[in-house]
Image: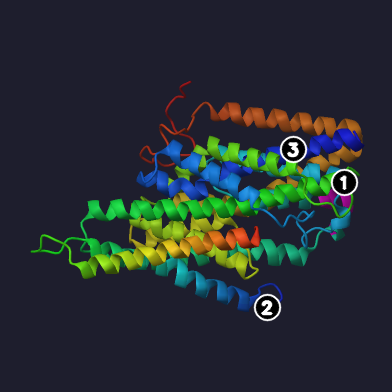
Amino acid sequence: MSTYIDVPALARVIAVSLLVGAGLPALFAVGVRALAPVEGRTSRSGLRVAAATLCFAICAATVLYGVYRIVATGGH
Amino acid sequence: MDGLPLLVVVVVTALAFDFTNGFHDTANAMATSIATGALRPRVAVALSAVLNVVGAFLSLTVAATIAKGIVDQDAVTLSVVFGGLVGGIIWNLVTWYFGLPSSSSHALIGGLVGAVLVAAGTSGVEWSGLVSKVIIPAVIAPVAAGLVALSGTWLVYRITRRVAGAERGREFRFGQIGSASLVSLAHGTNDAQKTMGIILLALIAGGQLPQDAGVPDWVVFACAAAMGLGTYLGGWRVIRTLGKGLVDIESPQGMAAETTSAAVILVSSHFGYPLSTTQVASGSIMGSGVGRRTPVRWGTARRMVVAWLVTLPAAAAVGATAETISRALGAAGNVIVLGLLITASAAIYLRSRRAPVDRHNVNDEWREPASEPAAPAMV
């Protein structure tokens, strides 16, 4: 099997993909939840807005890093 | 047809393949954004086209190779390249007609393998390379992407289960646009580069450029334009299948699926294990449906998998036929193959007009089987 499948490379691909591909949407979801109105309150607390901003900022930074990777490697 | 005329035909055919590549693969990036209304259909394909063009200009490391490690590079003559491109184009158009997302790279590789088999026999194909670089990754790609998208989607819905649907939808639509854009950019960089490599190879083989030449500017412009135009015209039939035919997509789920696609494509090529964009995107969308616990239309999924299995042999059969005609009849054979290519493409296009899918009906309710909508064609 291992002559046909580069097992270490594949394992790394799946591990990092899980971290980024599932982790980022989860982080984005945390941001969305932080911004959602809380029952019995009229205004959002500063802490929640800060947490949401941080989540969205990490997501945006990762996307920019993705663009940087594409530009830096000039394809694959 | 030898020398310059054949070279010109090969270059133009390569650009035509590049066009079908953009055309066929718009769906991978934009199907979910169009399905959830994150982007209006025309805006989505325009954004994807621009990013594909930008991506094409970022393709710095163009190698004058075609399917390296899969076919013996010495067996690759201009005529073989032509046969391979014909196989790739025809298969892209057939799968587009049936609205099936299938890998453009696989179609091209299939066409080439068929042409090489005729030109150089079985020793011209590096079978272990074909298995390890094409066939096994094709099995792994949808499974890996599906697993990641399943996990991401499940997490997203778990975390936001108390957030009102309308508000959640609005925010996730922004996320969808970002992740879909990344997929488009990666596609432009990856796939335009392959066509540039083919044209560079043809120019060197045809004696128009020295052995160590880089890509001429006009090749970069032409490839970027061909792919951008194809992307903008949008393979609506494939977009419809991926966006509506597999699962019903909501924006949080679309965002998870598209982020998965971008992550798997970029990470896999980073670790030197590149996976097909089409198979990754299709796997992501299916996985996201499972992750949200909505029914997946397995009938559509089954048709897609059949198309993936058939891609290599079918494109190979077309490539082999083209190369057989070219070898038997020489220059006249190339002309006949070109004529057949144009006739077949026109026939497929005209047939598609009987039941057109475009930006107006791309999001209509899905009916099984949808590859042949029963409604009579308009226009």
Q: What stretch of residues is rendered in magenta?
A: B115-122
* B68 sits left or right of B187 in the view: right
Mark positioned earlier in the residue sequence (3 or 1): 3
Q: Nearer the viewer, residue B24 or B320?
A: B24
Do the residues at pointers 3 and 1 share their chain?
Answer: yes
x, y percent for residue A34: 24, 66
The residue indicated by pointer 1 is B209
Q: Position of residue B345 (x, y in %)?
A: 66, 32
Could you tell me residue A6's position as x and y percent? 66, 75
Residue topped by disc 2: A2
Q: Residue at x 45, y 72 (%)?
A: A19
The chain under label 2 reads: A
Query: Is residue B101 visible from the viewing direction of this image?
Result: yes
From the viewer's perspective, is the residue at label 3 or at label 1 nearer?
1
What amino acid type should be assigned to the residue bearing mark 2?
Ser
Q: Chain of mark 1?
A: B
Q: Nearer the viewer, residue A16 or B379?
A: A16
